[in-house]
Each structure stands twice: as C-alpha cells, then as structure tokens.
Image: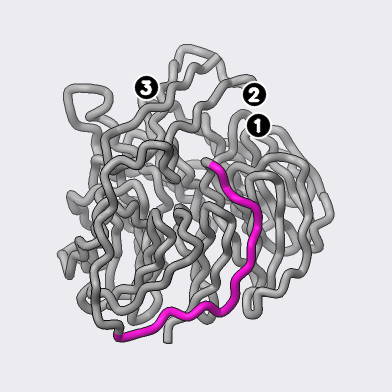
Amino acid sequence: MKSLMAMRLWPGLLLGLIFVQLSGCSGMGEKVSTGFGMWGGKDAGEKPAALVEFKPSAELKTLWRANVSGAGDAVLFPGVVKGSVYAAGLDGQIARFDAETGAQQWRINAGRKISGGVGAGANLVAVGTANGELLAFDGSGQPLWQVRLSSEIRSAPQVADDIVVVRTGDGRIYGLDARDGKRKWVYQRALPALSLRSYAGVVITRGAVFAGFAGGKLVALNLANGNVGWEATVALPRGATELERVADVSSLPVADDRMVCATAYQGRTTCFEIASGNLIWARDIASSAGLAMDERNVYVSDTRGAIHALDKHSGASMWKQDKLLDRQATAPVALGRYIAVADVQGYVHLLAREDGSFTARLATDGSQIGAPPVALSRGFLVQTRNGGLYALTVQ
C-alpha cells in the first residue's frame, strides 16, 4: 500500500508535498495526508506583503453573492456551463445558480464529502470524493450514477462529447461514458518519489485532453480513446536532492487554437504547438498557481506571488507586478483590458493589461481564494475557502 507523508517546502509556499513509496500497491485503503495544501495551514509561513495604496482607475462591483459550505483543506473549483454556475462544499452540498442573477435553482446534498469541485456538461453534473467515488447528477440535481475509481479525486471532473474525464491522485486519468459511468479508457503514469499535492485536473479542447504531471511533463490525449497524441517537457528536474528536483506541473495548462502553455513549480513556463507538441518558447519563471492567456500575452503567477505578462508569440517579458509577494496569488484570469487575481486573504486584485498596474481591488469574506477565477459572460466568479461565491464585474 502506498505510504504518503505531507511535507512543507519552505516559508511562503504552503503546498502539501507527498512522499510516495512507489513499490507498494494502489488501492482505496491508502491514507492521504492533506498537509498544508493550497489553502495553507496553521503555520502561515512568510507574512503576506502589505496591500499597496493606489488611485483606482476602474471599479470591481459585485453582481451577486451566494454561499455553499466551506472547503476545508480542499480546493473546490466552481463550474460554469450554459448560463449556470455550479458550486460545492466539502460537506457534500452542491448548488446550481443562475449565472446572470445568482438566483439559486436547486441545492442538494450528495451524502459524501466532496474533494475536487464541480464539473458540468449538457445535463450532467459530476463531483469526486476523497474515497475515489465519482458521483453524477442530471441538470435538475437528480442522481444518475456513481463509480469508484482507484484513488482520491482532488480536481473537478470535465465533461465533453458525452465523456467525463476525471483525474485521480495516483497518476491516472479516466474517460467515462457520460450516460452510465462505464470506463471507456484510462491513462496511467508513474509518479516520482516526491511530488506536489496538486488540485489541477485536465483541460479539454479541440478533441484533446491536456494534463500536466509530476516531473515536469505535459501530455496530450485523444478524448475519444485516451491514446497519447504527444508528450512534451515543460521543465526538467534539477538539483542534488529529491526536494530540489521537484518540478511538477501542478496547475492547469491553457490553450487556444494554435498553442498550449503550462508552468512548473521549481521549473519554467513553456508553450508548445497544440497539434504537434513542438516547443515554441520557454521562460525560467516557475509557478505552482498557474497561468492565463489572451490574444496578446500569457500571464503567470509565480511561486512568490508576482504576476508576469509574457508576449504570447515570443515569451518576451512585457511587465511584472511584484507587489503581491507571499499573498499566494491564484492563477490570473484575462478580462479584456484587465487581469484579475485573488489571494490568501480573500482580496481580488484588478491589474491593467498594458502595464500590470493596480486599477481596482475588492474584499470578499476574508478567507482564502485558492481556485483560479472563472470567466462569466459579464465578469468573473471566485469561490472562497469559507464557501462564498462572488460574481464580479468591472466598471
């Protein structure tokens, strides 16, 4: 049986690190220690940088606010599909809200502790548990099916083309039939001796599934059958010790029609041709939080919390905002003329796309925002550790 031990990297980066004894078997009885996780823990590490004063040139306004139960040590990703927002709490609450008004359409209790957030597609809502159970409901919240997979589900499932794609903590990715949960395919990858406890799942686009892995790898899989299209190296492990050699892709990649980009902890940020996996450019900017992309730039929240804008086509530095150090900034979201990130104290920061300067700031409920903001038709959504859902817009 796998033996897992949560560790801390250094002050200021509160990520659970798992030591995996690979010689053991994989099974549902494995004991997982959550460690500090992306939410932090009892030891706050480095003190977050003080909030800087600035003259606002825009305004963040709350379109609506709602609540689900808290997330505990999990990072619960909300889902947005066809005008609806789906959100879950650790205790099993799942709720559906109108994305425009925030009006609650239904709320159920799954009867299980939820560990990875909500994935949704056409008339299907899916959540995973720490015991490796995947639970599926229809658009009105009625149970459809449930299956048990090989390990803890720490990320939100994804739904596309009648396939539910879900990732488990033991290095497997499953493609399941959305109608009944039957397995269509499974991709398995061995984990290194030491790896970050990641809450990142997969990204589906253009009939492909993209996923980053421990050891600095990015893999493209065929959505229909799970076959490997290509594998590329985001970052190579470096250093004399196992700890120094951790170079995991622990956040979601981002993609458009031409390229896909990923970033690695203690590694670099790298972009590849989406069809072939050929390298386009790479920069020595490491991140465990993640990145975003628009038609001009790639935006990265580095391991200290600084936000970088890199030219999308060359990787050249456009600007750097370093006034959020140790505030555990989320991955950014691109919003036209602005970039938004959230932090450990529940603040949402709005930056100008042109130069990274602060343009607006909004406080939520004071608890950490760990999952990246999610774009809405008129703004974006954040979910706090205490279960607050805030739909925000820029004015």
Would you identify the image quadrant in which residue 104 lies? Answer: bottom right
Residue 148: percent from the left, percent from the top?
Answer: 71, 33
What's drawn in magenta, residue-wise? Answer: 57-72
State the image coordinates of residue 168 (x, y, percent, origin top left). 56, 36
Secondary structure of residue under mark 2:
loop
Which quarter of the rendering shows the N terminus?
top right
Q: Nearer the viewer, residue 100 or 20?
A: 100
Contact between marks 1 and 2 (CB within 8 A): the answer is: yes
Query: Which kind of residue does numbered mark 2 sit on?
Result: Met
Q: Which residue appears at 56% of the width and 43% of the height?
A: 72
Label 3 CA crowd tier, 10 Å (few <14, some 14–19, many 20+): some
As drawn, the label of residue 216 is: none
Give x and y (percent) for residue 265: 29, 42
* Residue type for callout 3: Ala
**SS of the residue under disc 1:** loop
The alpha-carbon separation of the residues under discs 1 and 2 comes to 7 Å
Residue located at (82% from left, 49% from top) = 144
